[in-house]
Amino acid sequence: MKSISPILLINKLVLVGHEKEYCVPFYPGVNIIYGDSDTGKSSILNLIDYLLGSKKVYMYEEIEKNGKYALLEVNLNGSVYTIKRDIFKPDELIEVYSTSIENMSELFPALYGPNYQKVGPAGYFSDFLLNALNIPLVKIKQAPSKMDSDLSRLSFRDIFKFNYLDQDDVGNRNILDSGNFSVFTKNKETFKFLHNLLDSQITDLQGQISEKTNEKNKLLESYQVISTFFKDTNIKTLETLSDDLAEYKQEVEHINREIQSINTQMRSDNAYFNDLRNLIIRLESELKLDTEAKSLKLAQLEQHVRLKKDYQQDIDKLESSLAIIKRLPEHKEEVDCPICSSKIEYTKLALNFEKNNSETVKLEIKSIKNRLKELETLIDTERNNIVSIEAEENHKNENLKKARQMLDIEAKEFVSPFIAQRDELVAEKATVIEKINKVEYLIKLRKQLNEIITKSNHLSEQIRQLTEKLDQLKAGAPSIEGVLSNIGSSLELFLKAIPIRKPYGISISEKNFLPVVRDRNYSELTSGGLRTLVSVGYILSLLQNSLNNSSNFPSIVMIDTIGKYLGKTKSGNDSIEGNTNEEILEGLDDPSKVINLYSFVTNLSEKFLEKDKLHQILIIDNDLPVELEVMVHLQKYVVKYFNVQGKNGGSVGFIDNA
């Protein structure tokens, strides 16, 4: 589409976190994000603003805990770029990829300084955005009324103030820093620049055309030098490299299949060794049982040997008693001591021996000897069992040793060829992967070279557009009265569509370029709800003017929170937000005002899209009237809905896993 003003569209915002990515898609036209408070709605616009160069991202706690860096895919005058920025290091260089988020890995990033105090290898980020949007790089007077006023560089951030109403700006009495004289002076000059009203604009355009022509010539010279180098070093063309890459990837897939086949074959043919493994397991199990049985037999043998010793001692004692009985005299008062030959009274000596006759002792000795003989037989049997177990152990150990050796030898002979073959394939795969990495690097270089041609073509188109704009300005530059009249008329249509009470005296001030309602300056309006509507109508009117007329105003507005100070009645809740006497007097406690507001915005957007005029309106709101929530027509514009309890299909928050 041929555009008369810069096109800036947000395609996708991605916050990359420690556990997952948090993504919000956007589309041409109206995009609505609404829901409960403290769910990260405003942080989404804050992140977009940060990725477009603001100094800091204001984020709620969950983003600070879970986030790492953010990506923004944008459409700048028909070209897609991805902007990458660390959310915790605003002074670090900003990475820009000339492609979508999905294809970032295919290109080297350009590195830009985040502000005019820090330049990157590719320059300043603000200059990148301005150049990509074909907005001239100019300097404007700090004190316009002085002929010798110092000049200050106009940045993208100066321009974007007119595109983004954050939640502090909506309905703010000092909108666009109107309470700060020095800042607001530059804002007024920026306003004139946006609508081609600066006296120096023709000269600036001529200078910009000259600079872009020189830049294009330098790019073509660089292309020629690099292209010659590639040719001299025999670096293949992008098409050939792409074919090589596809071929190498197919080769890797083939090798992977071969490796998988070898692994499968090894597992299937390995059944040959299962019998040996089972034999080894069985022998090891039997040897364990034999060892336990042997230990038991040895313990029993030890007990039997001890018992045999006890029996022998009993026999010895009984035989000694029998010998003494035989030597004892019969019916003597005194006897000679058998040890010392002294005299011992018989009665005293007899008391130390059992009153058993010799026959009884002999029978006891015979009985014990019989038991001893049986015990000796049992001991011999235990010894023989132990010897038998040891022999069986030796036999099984020998068989186990042979089985293990056989398994080792057979397995080695069987597995070695597979291992060798697989090692060869792994080495071959590593070589191919190295080739892939090299080819991918060369493809990046080739694409980087093609980027030069792409940039050259962009410059040619920008030069054409700037030349047309220059011709228009030379033929008849727009008058400040005409521009303000167009914007004022759009604002009046908006306020009457709501409608506000007493919609008269609506215009844009020629002194500060801010709205006038009921012949009162914007800052003099006492109703916060009325200021909300006027500020929203004002930024929408700026967008309308840029879509209908040639300007330097990017085709996007972001509003947070659009329903601020306006009354909304929710189901089951009769309370009114912003229910002050002033709001009641203005009639802004009526939910129909909000319904009319959304209807006007969506209808306006649809009409422009029907005329193929690309634009975006990003809206944040806390909640919607019940009538709007159930409207199928409005739901198609909702890109995110947040509900802390996860009800009605809503996400619990932008960080939905916190």
Image (tube, rainbow, N blue to C red):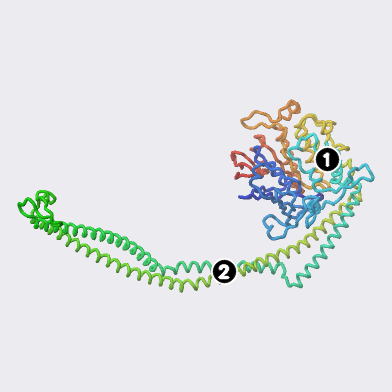
Image mark for residue 487:
1
Q: Amino acid at mark 1?
A: Ile
Foreground residue among 611 and 551: 551
Residue 442 image point, x, y percent? 70, 66
In this rendering, the answer to whether 658 lies above or below 217 is above
Q: Amino acid at mark 2?
A: Val
Foreground residue among 245 and 426: 426
Residue 601 image point, x, y percent? 74, 40
> What residue is drawn where x is 15% and y is 60%?
369
Q: Quadrant of residue 359?
A: bottom left
Judge the density around disc 1: few (<14), some (14-19), many (≥20) Cα neighbours within 10 Å: many
In this rendering, the answer to whether 535 lies above or below 216 is above
| Residue behind mark 2 | 426
> Alpha carbon of mark 2 to alpha carbon of mark 1: how far?
69 Å
Could you tell me how many numbered marks the image carries?
2
Task: Find out whether the residues at labels 2 and 1 contact each other: C-beta distance under 8 Å.
Answer: no
Q: Is residue 252 visible?
A: yes
Q: Quadrant of the C terminus?
A: top right
Q: Is residue 633 visible?
A: no
> What residue is drawn where x is 82% and y is 62%?
219
Residue 271 image point, x, y percent? 42, 68
Judge the density around disc 2: few (<14), some (14-19), many (≥20) Cα neighbours within 10 Å: some
